[in-house]
Amino acid sequence: MEMKNNILKNRFLIAFLLSGFLFNACSLDIKETDSIKTKGASDVFNGVPDVDGALAGIYNNISGQTGDQANLYALTEVTTDELLVPTRGTDWGDNGIWRTLHVHTFGPTHNFVTQVWNDKNGAVLTCTSVIDPLSKALPAQLASAKFARAYNMWIVMDFWGKVPFRNPKDGPDVTPAVMSRKDAYNMVVKDLTDAIADLPASAPTSSDKTRPVKATARFLLAKMKLNSIVYNGAYGSTDLDDVITLVNAIEADGYSMVNGNYFDLFKGPTFTNTDVIWNVNAGAGNRMWSSLHYNQAKNNEIAGTGTNSGGGWNGFSTLTEFYDKFQGPADDNSKGLGQEERRGYTQTLASTNAVNEGFGFGFQFGQMYGWKDGAAVALNDRTGKPLVLTKAFAESGLIGNGERTGARLLKYSPANGAFTAGVVMARFSDAHLMRAEAMLRKANAAGALIEVNKLRALRANTPALASLDLNAMLDERGRELYTEGWRRNDMIRFGTFKAAKKFKPAGDGHTDLFPIPASAILSNPGLIQNPGY
């Protein structure tokens, strides 16, 4: 559909351009016309005049990028075994921008790679402007800005292995310095450590988790420590112990795993359950409708009355091999078949009701249903054939698929509303699994197994594991955290991101880092392209 439905792609692009800062392509060059020129300590920068306003823009920027199904979400998910976007006729061709993500043939001119580089480096500069002493931010404001800088810088460091960094007081002729991965890692760790001291106390049942608290910073710091084997080449002497200590502190603050409907954890717009540590106000609509078929919509059979009468976009799908990691019938995910809870279910004619109007949760394939005149109805595709989604794709590969190929994933479902606001960024269940992984990597497999089975015991129809190794640990994280933005990060840490998957041969590992955008290389002589590109 040539991205015609990408309605949110640039909605928040301007949100973080506060304090008069605009950034050029990738080098973050600041032109005189783009800057606040004031008298004082610097001819270019003399502090952010409205720190609260700048912080609001910083967090709106994070929210806006999270709500987009392209760019950041695409790089973290479509590059993995969780999601792919096959070309269906002429729909979703887009000059191969989606296909190259799945098969890892993306290059330095890929639009999503360039966009995320610009977004995140620009956000780092805005955060640094707030942190600068000239802005006179209060301790709590500094802590919030340091967390946001750590989050944005972490993504740059994680994606590209190096970070261009500009001091806001530098003039427009100063080329940003290039931080190594190790230096960027150390800066992120310091920012998070500093932030913990002055962030608000944790609030596990708060109705507003859109701004960081102590637990939010501890969560991201635990991520950093767990991934230090990637960022630093090996674990430091205390890294794994630090992960356990940080998660213990989050738990001591009152966060916990929740016993109940798994998919209710993601039902916004507010998340008062103790599992959610951080969420943003972004709508979940793009994540839902980019996957669903054109003829699937809220009340789509009642003409003109639905909140999304236009239907889905019929793009994002999942791989059979990822579905097969879950327990339950191999070829049927209809409701009530005893499948494990996190796999979700496809609604059937007998089980559909006016509350969910035909929509299920989790993996969707088989006959799709809608709702009309108080009853469930079987839907057809655009040619009039029964809308039966298949797990398999065309043998020809990512090109030449029909409109019914590929199972779809609905962690956020229209059953809860067509464009429900609220996307979860961090959960205690993730932290719990991080602690278990740290135990496993410290050769405490028995203790790690107990921890993993504590989580599984809270998920219906999910029996305990008999043993646990690193492969099983990665699979468990996939089952619990799919489409939450962690799969690429996990697969790299476990050494499987380069492995073969459907339609993609095994690689040499160079795609663990994305290519530095070509425009950045041209504008900053300190940047050297990552190997393999």
Image (cartoon, grey):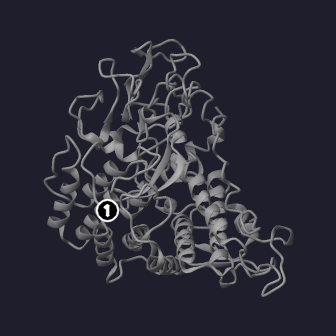
Name the one closer to the observer, 404 or 460.
460
On screen, residue 198 versus residue 215, left or right, reads: right
Please tell me how many numbered marks the rendered image carries. Answer: 1
Residue at point 44%, 77% (across, down)? 196
Q: In terms of secondary structure, where does tag 1 sit?
A: loop
On screen, residue 196 versus residue 52, left or right, reads: left
Residue at point 67%, 62% (across, down)? 16
Name the one closer to the observer, 496 or 193.
193
Q: Position of residue 191 (x, y in %)?
A: 51, 78
Q: Position of residue 159 (x, y in %)?
A: 54, 63
Q: Residue furthest bottom?
A: 41
Q: Quadrant of the N terminus?
A: top right
Q: Residue furthest right?
A: 33
Badge 1: how crowded within 10 Å, few (<14), some, or many (20+)?
many
Position of residue 4 relative to residue 278, above or below, is above
Name the one closer to the observer, 139 or 84.
139
Position of residue 408 relative to residue 101, above or below, is above
Q: Position of residue 163 (x, y in %)?
A: 60, 73
Q: Quadrant of the C terminus?
A: bottom right
Quick check: can you spot residue 521? yes
Residue 260 occupies which quadrant of the picture? top left
Quick check: can you spot residue 498? no
Residue 416 occupies which quadrant of the picture? top left
Which amino acid lies under the numbered mark 1 shown in the image of this protein? Answer: Tyr
Q: Position of residue 110 (x, y in %)?
A: 65, 52
Name the residue that disc number 1 marks: 255
